[in-house]
Amino acid sequence: MTATSYKNGLLQMENVPLQRIAQKHGTPVYCYSTRQLADNFHAYQTALSDIMPEDKFTICYACKANSNQAILHLLGMLGAGADVVSGGEMYRAFKAGVTHDKMVFSGVGKTADEIVKAVRNDILQINVESEPELNLVSTLAAKESSAKAHIALRVNPDVDANTHEKITTGRSGNKFGIDIKAAPALYRRARDMAGLAPTGVAVHIGSQLMDLAPFAEAFKRVAELVNELRQQGNIITTVDLGGGLGVPYRGETPPDIKKYAGLIRDIILPLNVHVILEPGRSIAADAGVLLTRVRYIKESGDKRFLIVDAGMNDLARPALYDAYHAIMPCGEPAKGAVMTAYDVVGPVCETSDTFRTGAELPRIDPDALLAIMTAGAYGASMASNYNTRPLPAEVLVSDEQFDLIRPAQKIEDIAAADVIPDWLA
Ligand code: LLP
């Protein structure tokens, strides 16, 4: 049972009618369900504990999906680690209580500063994405610490993830990872480099995968590589299998988590390694909605626009990836209500600020409250100040209670950061 559904004529998250949150905190506002976040995390935990002992795996939640500290803290309490891709995410994850031994650091453009922080904090693993980065990590780690930094090379297995081209990462020609064919030579070098313990192999082929076959293909290539590396004398103790499963945005059937774990059991467990997973979307997406109020209903030719108060700056996915998000009125439509086609658009001055063209909705009243669904992942974390619009508020719901976990930004705070140089004055 999903955490957001109609009860007593109102769309509720757990036991809170979403109307109440909008009344108290205004709109646009992101709302997240504690229960759904926990259920999603437990699904991974259970699927993995069914196939291996708990100390043989770490689920490092991909903070980029939603990096609010309340969410990192909640997941941390449940046993999650963190996959971070910037000094900022590392800072937030530490502040939220994630421990160093459960943190992995990924990303193609790590700065020296960020690498030093990772080394000083002795994190579980740095996933290195290029030879120049390997050299830099070695130099910095040798200088910083007597202990060696545990690193994995993130390999690019050249597998088509069959997902949106903008979120595919494991094809040759993508900027990510090290060509899997070049990896053995680089591991041979890394073994003798100062400051490094090259003990891991990492892979990530893309996000929103709705099919298990590309995972299987990538895992097989990784397993072959681990065997080859061991034959050449490398000590490989961890395998990081990257991001998690895709989620249904419009009623599709998501891949089965038990079957996914079955792939890990069949392909990876024979290697006898510590397994790291970095799921993001499948933990946070369906736990969140973006609440938005209709500002104007505008008729133009044969078009009917619902102009809402959330924009592409709040939720960029439709504009960036033509992503589909279901839109539900917060008051339950009457049974058999006649549907009307609306274009649901935001206030931002771009035609791409469109949440949906031709959404079939019951008659919507001015001022109606709408929920843009499955917005918990890559929603708030990708929000921007475009059009000098403040970042939206975020609220966490648990049973009958709800609290702000981030207030809406103030326009004054955005403006206060600008500096007019003296020579212009
Ligand atoms: N690990 C690495 C190295 C990644 O690059 C990603 C996502 C993940 C883990 C988490 O993958 P997930 O479990 O969420 O599929 N903004 C896009 C998604 C970008 C994903 C980037 N990398 C969107 O809104 O669809």
Image (cartoon, rainbow, N blue to C red):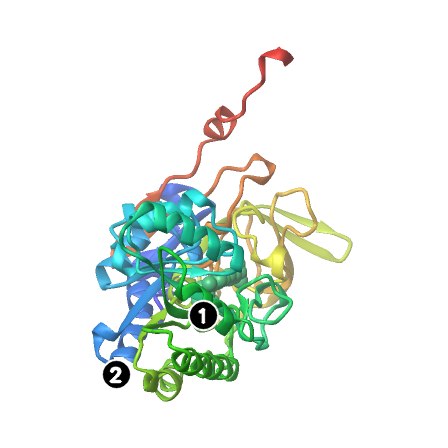
Q: Residue at x 61, y 61 (%)?
A: 321
For the point 53% across and 55% down, the residue is: 132
Label 1: which secondary element: helix
Identified at 32% across, 46% down, the residue is 144
What is the CA distance from the residue labelled 1 to the residue labelled 2?
Answer: 35 Å
Residue 153 in the image, given as x and y percentages of width and height: 45, 66
**Residue 327 visible (yes or no):** no
Q: Is residue 134 above or below residue 218?
A: above
Residue 236, above or below 288: below
Quadrant of the rendered structure where residue 170 is? Answer: bottom right
Residue under pointer 1: 188
* Whether residue 334 is situated above or below residue 65 in the rendered picture: below
Residue annotated with mark 2: 50
Asked if residue 224 shows in the view, the reply is yes
On the image, which quarter does residue 106 sit in?
bottom left
Residue sticking out furthest to the front: 192
Q: Is residue 6 left or right of residue 75?
A: right
Q: Position of residue 389 (x, y in %)?
A: 54, 37
Q: Residue 67: which numbered mark, if any?
A: none
Amino acid found under the numbered disc labelled 2: Asp
Which class describes the residues within 10 Å of circle 1: few (<14), some (14-19), or many (20+)? some
Q: Residues within 10 Å of mark 2 (few under 14, many from 20)?
A: some
What type is the residue that disc 1 sits on? Arg
Q: Position of residue 48 (x, y in %)?
A: 29, 78
Q: How many marks?
A: 2
Q: Report the front residue among 79 and 390.
A: 79
Q: Nearer the viewer, residue 398 or 203?
A: 203
Relative placement, left or right, of 346 versus 230 is: right
Tag 2 secondary structure:
loop
